Image (cartoon, grey):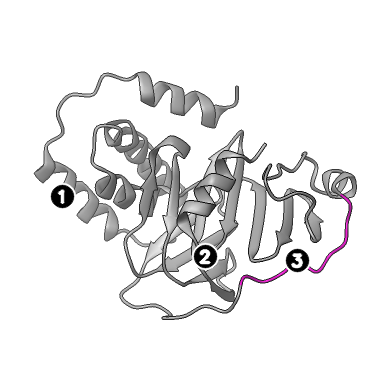
Amino acid sequence: MNLDDELRVLGRSAVVPPVDEELTAAVLTRVADLPVRRRLRDRWRAFLAGFMVLLAGLALTPPVRATVAEWLRIGGVEAQPVGTGPSTAPPVPEVQGRLSLEQAERTAGFRPALPRDLGAPTGVEASKGFVAMSWDGVRLEQFQAEVSPLYFKKYYESLEFVPDLDAFWFKTPHELVLADQRVIRIAGPTLVWVRGGVTFRLEVADKTRAVELARGTF
């Protein structure tokens, strides 16, 4: 069991006192005012504060848990709310590479997971710590979560928490930004979750289908 899984187990087993809603709102407001780029000392302070809120968050309602995720990060994805965003997104982009799954595993350094119901992907690409694959209208990216995030997602509506997957659903089109702040494209609705130290981005138009596919990913 890795650190991510151990923290989740700890969080689920923790006995949390009743949450003071006014205190929670004050903490979230204070955190929202922090700059994105912090000195190392401030990052550690934010991490420790975030971990305590994460444990308490198990007793919160889903909307508040989604707000916590905005600044805690979701694995290798950091979510940044903005005032406005794109109203539409292009179709889910196909992966153009034609690697075999074995080649992708050797290149990425980990075995990529597959949705059980989709069969063999039509396209596969890989780089160190990263695999992307696609089917008709579905794109799945998976990458090992590092200390720094790979992606920033700039979205303008609240996230929807999916409890049984510990996942978050980005229901509206949003900017997908690399860690170096380059906007690479506008992404459509996406489900994001973390398992076994790997972050998953499942881009598909329908939430119900996304959740079903994520549950069947092995």
Q: Amino acid at mark 1?
A: Ala
Q: Which residue is mark 3?
A: 95
Q: Position of residue 49 (x, y in %)?
A: 32, 39
- Give the dominant element type of the magenta stretch: helix, strand or loop: loop
Residue at 32%, 31% in the rendered image: 55
Label 1 crowding class (10 Å Cα cut-off): few <14, some 14-19, many 20+? few
Answer whether labels 3 and 1 touch (C-beta < 8 Å): no
> Is residue 147 something one can see in this rendering?
no
Of the numbered discs 3 and 1, the one sitting upstream in the chain is: 1
Of the numbered discs 1 and 2, the one sitting upstream in the chain is: 1
Closer-to-camera residue (76/105)? 105
Residue 96 falls within the magenta-colored stretch: yes
Closer-to-camera residue (41/12)? 12
- Disc 3 to disc 2, C-alpha distance: 17 Å
Q: Position of residue 191 (x, y in %)?
A: 50, 54
Of the numbered discs 3 and 2, the one sitting upstream in the chain is: 3
Q: Which mark is residue 205?
A: 2
Residue at 72%, 52% in the rendered image: 130
Q: To which quarter of the image does residue 62 belong?
A: top left
Q: Position of residue 83 (x, y in %)?
A: 30, 75
Question: Is 42 left or right of 109, judged from the image as shown?
Answer: left
Query: The magenta stretch spans which residues?
Result: 92-100
In the picture shown, does residue 17 fall above or below 75? above
Q: Position of residue 42 (x, y in %)?
A: 38, 48
Q: Helix or strand or loop: what does disc 2 sit on? A: loop
Q: Which mark is residue 126?
A: none
In the picture shown, does residue 49 fall above or below 173? above
Q: Amino acid at mark 3?
A: Val
Q: Helix or strand or loop: what does disc 1 sit on? A: helix
Q: Which residue is mark 1?
A: 26
